[in-house]
Amino acid sequence: DFLFIELFLWGRAQGYARFSLGMAPLSGLAQHRLAGRWNRLAGLLARHGERFYGFSGLRRFKSKFDPQWRPRYLAAPGGMHLPAALLDATRLISLDPRRN
């Protein structure tokens, strides 16, 4: 928490008006029976994938700073193209710039 507060204060002193905490993956998914197939699958992954990636913990941590949550969308062709698009997005986000 201290590090983020210091970053916020530094940014303000430098004239920045906003600070991005990034995204909170797989949060805010619709849980009703009419939700789309991929949305339900993502919800299942979020619930059962906690031991591999702290989806809810990350959201809770970021919520402490009272962020303005804004939805982000990924458009992809239907069918089995969506998993490939999600994998590509994951690779893009987690890309180590030092790797070739």
Image (spheres, grey):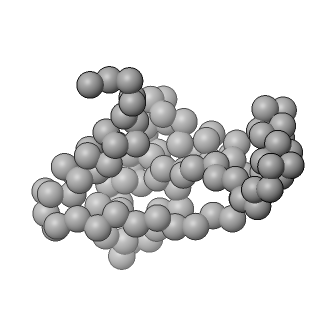
* Residue 79 in the figure: left or right of residue 55: left
Q: Is residue 68 above or below residue 45?
A: below
Quadrant in which residue 81 is drawn: bottom left
Residue 8 visible in the snapshot: no
Quadrant containing the C terminus in the rendered view: top left
Q: Is residue 58 left or right of residue 18?
A: left
Where's the N terminus, which quadrant?
top right
Residue under the point 44% across and 29% down: 52
Q: Is residue 2 visible?
A: yes
Among the 4 quarters of the image, the one containing residue 91: top left
Q: Position of residue 21 (x, y in %)?
A: 64, 49
Residue pictured at 80% horizontal, 49% vertical: 14
Residue sitting at 53 percent across and 42 percent down?
55
Q: Residue 17: give x, y in percent of width and height.
A: 76, 61
Q: Outermost residue toward the top?
A: 99
Q: Nearer the viewer, residue 85 or 52?
A: 85
Give the residue at the far left of this rendering.
80
Instruction: Please tell me which residue lies in front, 88 or 54.
Output: 88
**Residue 18, how many percent across, how many down?**
72, 59
Q: Residue pushed farthest bottom?
A: 34
Residue 39 as seen in the image, left or right of residue 22:
left
Q: Position of residue 37 (x, y in %)?
A: 27, 64
Please say if 28 is above or below 96: below
